[in-house]
Amino acid sequence: MDQWVSWCLVVLPALPVLSAIMAPLAGSGQQARAARLSVAMTAVTCVVSVALLVAVLRAPQGDVTVARLGPAALMLDNLAVAMAVLVSAISLVVHVYSVRYMADEPGYVRFFAMLDLMTAVILLMVTAADLLTLLAAWFLIGVLLFFLLGFDTSRKASGRYALWTFLTYRVGDLPMVGAALLLWHGYGTAELSELFARITANPDVQLGGVAVVPLVAMLLALAAFARSAQFLLHTWLPYTMDGPTPVSALMHAGIVNAGGFLFNRFAPVFVHAPDALHLAFVVGLVTALIGSALMLTQNDVKKSLGYSTMGQMGFMIMECGLGAFSLAVYHLIAHGLFKATLFLNAGNVIGDSRREDGVPPDDIYSFVVERRPLREVQKVPWLWAALATVLVPALVLGLSHGMVAADFFHKQGSVVLLFFGWVTGAQLFFSIHKMPSESPLRTLTMVLLSFFIVVVGYTLIAHTFENFLYPDAELRDAIYAAASINVLAFDTLVVLVTVALVGSWLATFYTHSLEFGGKPGTRWNAIYLNLYALFSREFYVSYIYTQLARGTLSATKRVNIWLRWV
């Protein structure tokens, strides 16, 4: 059985590489044949990943298989197999979609070969068992993404933003290399399983009077921030939408969400580095808020999806900062499948919008254009909406989590996640009050039932997935403990966030009465215009980077002239 699993583990990244070699040879003169071969090999890769998942589910908990593919060491554990299934599944969908989407593009066979190579490298990254293999795969992903984003060489914007992405990734690679070197010199091994065992036995190793583990955790967090488009390192993500749509979808298969994978792979390191987790929480929270806000101000559907991804990656990193590592993996898997589908459907949305007149099909439109009689609509009574808004989300969330884990409420990270869940649910029920309906009671009942089913289903799946990824309860508790802060700071944070969110709700509800978009010259109108300019210019981050680049080039030209180098 172990030999069969080891063989499948080696075959998993080898199949896409073989496809990348065979497709151009088989497709000389017949492009369709190359595409069919690439799709078939990707389908086999997906089947192999599912077979490995079955093998992991049958194996004893905590069992890890290690195999070798040339100089690379591969590891099969619960995290690796979960990511492998995600990567191969999204890659298969993207391959099938690209058969017709890229049919009229020059370099058709080359595109499929690069898709195969990208799939192989991502699979190599998620199954890497040593630091060298992980570093090589981490670096190659950025290189291949550069070629995929700049696939259409006739578009200058594609090449420019592909280079922008490449440079951002290289900046993120530097702390990754530094972390690997510190771990190698501090603990004397590059094998991840042995490395984690030594860190657990002795987390206080120092080099030159500096503790290795906390510094490594900070460097790994910085690498994750760059790869997952966190704020100030996010500008590459929304501007890569000029690349082919299949590439935008494939980016959610272990590329842009690789930050969450990195936190989980090095979980034994972050257990001993609470400051890195606190930094991840702050950076993730800021990124989530800014990404979600910028998503709402875009008039380009793919760019809007790009900022939506930025916001979701912020939530993912924030979950890591709270100690909910398994929830971050669950989040990146669900978001990867969902967002890849949205990108592949973006063309249909654009086509449908061009065919429609843009008039919303409300009751007045139906009465004037379609000659339908107006319906007698009502709204949910304010008292019912208020009680549902405050009580129902808290009760459903509390009871569902209490049933599956009695100690869930003793962890600060879990409480914060419950708080955000309550806010989301409360916002949903708050909107019911404004929702016109012929039967308000039926509408409220259906929303309550749907919310209950979603929350209970999500809770059961999330806790089951947590036990799957981290069967060691001590490690789970240690991660949550590392992410906790003192009680006073925690309570203050919850109060401040509550006040901010309630204030945002009230400001949104009373927008018209406060005249945010009121008469010209009013104070609220000036605030509204300034906020609109700030969001429409994307907080001027790209502008500042452009000016810094131009200033640097100008300064280097002057130095070259002064030193007579040119």
Image (cartoon, helix red, strand yellow):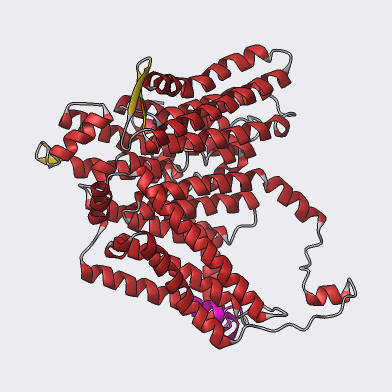
Q: Nearer the viewer, residue 202 or 292?
A: 202
The magenta stretch is: 505-517
Residue 547 visible in this rendered orientation of the protein:
no
Secondary structure of the magenta portion, mostly?
helix
**Residue at (43% x, 24% y) in the render:** 9
Q: Determine if the magenta segment contains residue 514.
A: yes
216 vs 1, left or right, is: left
Q: Position of residue 37 (x, y in %)?
A: 65, 20
- Quadrant (top left/top right/bottom left/bottom right) for the C terminus: top left
**Residue at (35% x, 33% y) in the render:** 562
Count of labels in the image: 0
Q: What residue occupies the far right of the structure in this picture?
A: 371
Residue 172 visible in this rendered orientation of the protein:
yes
- Quadrant (top left/top right/bottom left/bottom right) for the N terminus: top left
Q: Is residue 307 above or below residue 206?
A: below
Q: Is residue 565 above or below residue 225?
A: above
Question: Where is residue 403, by image quadrant?
Answer: bottom left
Q: Determine if the magenta segment contains residue 59.
A: no
Question: Where is residue 210, by image quadrant?
Answer: top left
**Residue at (31% x, 53% y) in the render:** 323
Q: Is residue 189 above or below residue 514?
A: above
**Residue at (49% x, 45% y) in the render:** 333
Q: Nearer the viewer, residue 452 or 146?
A: 452
Q: Position of residue 94 (x, y in %)?
A: 62, 35
Q: Position of residue 195 (x, y in %)?
A: 22, 32
Q: Position of residue 444 (x, y in %)?
A: 61, 76
194 vs 307, left or right, is: left
